[in-house]
Amino acid sequence: MSASETGLRDEILATATQLFIQQGYHGLAMRQISEALGVSKAALYYYFEDKEELLLAILTDYLEEIETAIAAIQAQTESGAEQIRRFVEMVLQQPAERRAIIRLASQEMAQLSASARTRFNRLYHEKFIGKLTALLQGGMERGEFRPLDAKTAAWALLGIMYPYFYPAHSGDRPIEPGTIDEIVTIYLNGLTQP
């Protein structure tokens, strides 16, 4: 793919991401994406077979970013608690539109074909949930965290973070460091007094 083709593909992904977040999967037509970009529908179909493939490309690209970031966090010689803090910071300090991709994935999966859902779920667990679970499992194996089911612990962390994946709840800016500190403290220490 040439640089200009790569540039247009990236532009399609960026515009489509914004429109999917605003309108949802069923509320958006390929025609609207082509109009927003100022390109023909044929240009969109050159890069993506259909709307489903376009959404999966957006989600897959994001999962690859997350996987790379988690690998970088794990490569550090920090404690498990610091790795959790860095993970929460990495996700919540993204612009609201990037954070909303996680919400988009969970809300729109039911709209896709069974084969697309299966493919996405495999990638989601391989590149995101599995990596986060491994990070937590590592802390448990080092004796830094209580021995719990690491996958449940991963879902619990995401549950605490989930409201911040909504721009309407959290605003358009990255989440403030003080809020991130409170989220991490609640996750790691709970609400009870020591």
Image (spheres, rainbow, N blue to C red):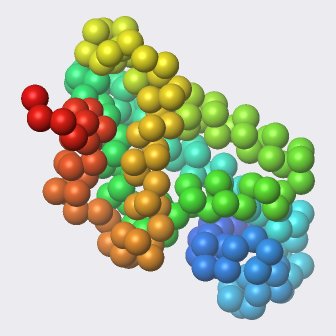
**Quadrant in which the N terminus appears:** bottom right
Going by the image, does 154 lie left or right of 20? left
Can you see residue 2?
A: no
Furthest-front residue in view?
Answer: 192
Q: Is residue 24 above or below residue 81?
A: below
Residues 124 and 15: in front is 124
The C terminus, quarter of image? top left
What count of labels does the image hold? 0
- Which residue is depicted at the point 22% across and 33% down? 189
**Residue 105 left/right relative to 101:** right
Residue 107 appears in the figure: yes
Residue 150: x and y, percent?
A: 47, 22
Q: Residue at x 82, y 79 (%)?
A: 30
Residue closest to the eye, 70 or 162: 162
Q: In this view, does 10 lie above or below 18?
A: above
Asked if residue 58 lies left or right of residue 77, the reply is: right
| Picture layout, residue 95 above or below residue 190 | below
Quadrant assignment, res 81: top left
Coordinates of residue 100 in the picture (x, y in percent): 52, 64
Q: Position of residue 192 (x, y in %)?
A: 18, 36
Q: In which quarter of the image is residue 73?
A: top left
* Closer-to-camera residue (42/6): 42
- Percent x, y for residue 47? 81, 65
Residue at position x 47%, y 33% in the image: 154
Camera-nearest residue between 13 and 140: 140
